Amino acid sequence: MKSIGFISSVIYTGIALVAAGLFLAVTLPGRYTLVESIGGTVWVFSLSMIILMPIITPIVKKKRGRVKF
Amino acid sequence: MATAGRRKLRKITLQIAGMTCASCVTHNEQALGDMPGVEKVVVNLATGKVTVEYEPERVTLADMRKTVADIGYEVVLDNVQLHITGMTCASCVANIEKAVGDLPGVGKIVVSLNIGGANLEYVSSVTSFFEIKKTVESLGYGVSQKIEGQEALDREQIARYRDVRRQLINLIISGILGMLVMVGMLQPYFFKFLPDLMNNKVLLFFLTTPIVLGPGRQFFVNSWNGLRRGITDMNLLYATGIGAAYGIAVINTFWPDAGFGGKEATFYEAAAMLTVFIIFGRYLEAVTRGRTSEAIRRLFKLQPKRARVFRDGQEAAIPAEEVQIDDVLVVRPGETIPVDGIVVEGYSSVDQSMITGESLPIEKKAGDEVIGATFNKTGAFRFRATKVGKDTALSQIIKLVEEAQTTKAPIQKLADKVAGKFILGVHALSLATFLFWFFIGFDLWFVPESRLILTPYSLTEVGTFGLALLVSVTVLVISCPCAVGLATPSAIMAGTGKGAEYGILFKGADTIETTTKLQVVIFDKTGTLTKGQPSVTGVIARTGDEKEVLHLAAVAEKNSEHPFGEAIVNEAKARGSVLEDPTLFESIPGRGVAAQFDNHNILLGNRRLMAEREISLDSLINEAERLEWEGKIVMFVAVDNDAVGIISVADTLKETSVLVIEELHQMGFEVVMLTGDNRRTAEAIARQVGIDRVLAEILPEDKANEVKKLQAEGKMTAMVGDGINDAPALAQADVGIAIGSGTDIAKETGHVILINDDLLDVVTGIQVAKTTIRKVKENLFWAFGYNTLAIPFGMGILYPFFGQVVSPELAALLMATSSISVTLNTLRMRGFVPAVRRRGGKRTCQQVTIAAHPVGVHTD
């Protein structure tokens, strides 16, 4: 059985990557420089991770039961 | 030790070092709470203590220490140096280390054969030093605590000192370097006389990096530890803010063409000053934590170190903790009494203010109780120890205050919960702000000449990403409710400490909060509003001499044990009567007494007794009814079947009863009196003290039900009474106030314990609680509301109108202001004097006497 930490990280990293990918997709063909697009993508990814980690982890923990990290 | 179902739970309180904010509380609560076998965890940031309820079979102290260490904190243990005698070889060392190391509260013991001693780290609340000593002695060795180790006992103070020093060092390092960075960044604008080298970006990189990776490292480590467990915290806000500012500055220094604004957009001073201000806030918090726990530290310091004990006819000075029950101790003028006991010889006056809050010294003679840690002023005396170690009044007070300080008020639980969500919300807001300025704001409003507020910097070199990131980081920093972790516990600590100064002990933070919501205060009558000691208030003789009537009544009551009998005997003696023994004495339950003296039959009792003996009361009945209306108990005296007089008996109101009721009315409370007396007597007393509502003729076992009935009316109710006799009613009340507990604190049932028998402490306690919770709310405003109000400015609301943005370092300064506000506001509590004490607690009512329990009526 996979650990809660692993499952959670797959979920929140996945969602954050999707959000960052969306940002990149929107900015790349536009008037933004590559650096601005990539910088923004990194920032969106970082904040998305930070927002999602504390949301996803307890949800997974709740569903899978309390397990020590 | 508590038992939950079949599981045996043990409670342990540990001192944790390294906690700096509310998120540290969450980290520790969650990490310890996740351990198998841990039932409940409560962390108090202000005291730096964590209380854990756990199953000793499933989890050990070592496990907890490891878990706490894993998330970046440290469990601080008591550290003592032992002097061990009788060790001869290495196996002695191994034996002692094994035996002591296996004790549940021992963290570490290192025995040294060479120095004949050991270094011991343990948790005294789990295993006492005495138990450790017994264990070593059972192996055949002698052991004592090295005197110099005594100084290490104040582990709390040491831990606080270390925390303050750590933050101070961080502040000095980051402050000096930060100022250099600031000067360097401003060199082209204000400090042109300085060499251009000061503004060299590589130099600034080398000045800023030690700040971020040194003092600032704690934020990155702590936030990562939190994130691993799914916890967002204030450290995260700092880490993202500092990290973003520093990252962009580094990129623009070494890769200026990367498109992040170039060399002129290196905000090294943002990263540096952000760290400086945050650490400044942390330093202030550490100092505040130390200050607010002063009350408990003062109590700790009261613990005497040495005692003079008489053993085998010799006087010897020994460590106070080695005093045993029934030891006879000697106390000389100017010395502190080491333990609780009873005076056996000598006379002195003792200053008990440090324990009871009583300002005047108390006279002590043989048979009187003395309290450990109080100060002997004038004479020398000997006393027999009755309570030692953990059982002394001081130890109980310390335990109670400490326990109260480790509890959380409902308002704090709410604040912690909101803080967690708030931080998450702030990150979401930061992301939204970034996206807004990236896609919309920049195009709509950006002008290259625009500036950061209060700085000479223009944003010329900043591009879309740079501006959006700058505003996004500012939102993170400006909205950080970093002082929220300190807001409630620091005020609660200050409040419980202030209460202890007046001899008022709150058993928990929740009690303090509930006390502020009270609507009704119920007083038990006897022993609470009154002294519980009846006295003679008047003697009426139908014919002849009042003194003779009193003398006959006193002779009849001479062998009685009834409180009224004692009151009559005492009064007669006070008036100079010499009391002979009656030739016959008969107690008639519920009615009075009959006696024979000097060939006369004397009857003393109530109306029923007189009626049964067919004695006419016509000549006395008007006087009797008048006295009864005044709430006094009337006892008729008959000699040879002829009513000769009346003796009225009444309990005496305490000096402050009327004042207390008046104060409570002024504060808007409904005041109720609960008594077993008959209604007429009860109402007479109520009239005298000014009580609104009387619940009379209540059996002792029904008192709790009466409290319940008032609660059913939707009223928050306090019950003031004797902590032992009124225990069920005190437990039923929303706040049970046990009055006059003296030194038997452990026996008390109440939520609030008043050490003194002074009713005024009820008002004082309520005023302390109200001020404490007001401080909590003010602190929460400074910690929370203030940041919330600043968020729009952080988001750049001023930019479209004034072309100015709040810089991250200004945001950090605003954030630190929040901590300063909380700190100063809490410290103001130190000088707080409850209004009732300010107005002169010595203002008392005149002595008023009221009826005690009528004969034949159940009593309370």
Image (spheres, coloured by chain):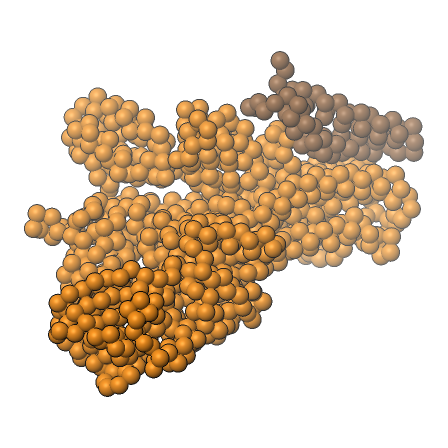
Chain colours: A brown, B orange
Q: Nearer the viewer, residue B708 or B332?
A: B708
The correct choice, above or below, for B656 with respect to B385 in the image is below
Residue occupying the far top of the picture: A1
At 80% across and 40% down in the image, what residue appears?
A: B432
At 16% across and 26% down in the image, what residue appears?
A: B88
Any part of residue B118 in sight? yes
Residue occupying the far left of the picture: B313
At 46% across and 66% down in the image, what residue appears?
A: B679
> Split into 4 quadrants, where in the image is the C terminus of chain B?
bottom left
Please give the count of numbered marks on the rendered protein: 0
At 64% across and 26% down in the image, what residue appears?
A: A62
The correct choice, above or below, for B466 with respect to B797 in the image is above
Q: Nearer the viewer, residue B559 or B598?
A: B598
Locate residue B145 relative to residue B382 in the image: left or right: right
Q: Position of residue B121 (x, y in %)?
A: 34, 35
Q: Position of residue B823 (x, y in %)?
A: 56, 56
Q: Position of residue B47 (x, y in %)?
A: 47, 47
Locate residue A50 relative to residue B617 in the image: left or right: right
Q: Nearer the viewer, residue B471 or B272?
A: B471
Q: Position of residue B122 (x, y in %)?
A: 35, 35
Any part of residue B824 in sight? no
Residue occupying the far bottom of the picture: B544
Q: Nearer the viewer, residue B578 or B464?
A: B578
The correct choice, above or below, for B181 with respect to B28 in the image is below
**Image quarter for residue B609?**
bottom left
The correct choice, above or below, for B858 with respect to B467 in the image is below
> Split into 4 quadrants, where in the image is the N terminus of chain B?
top left
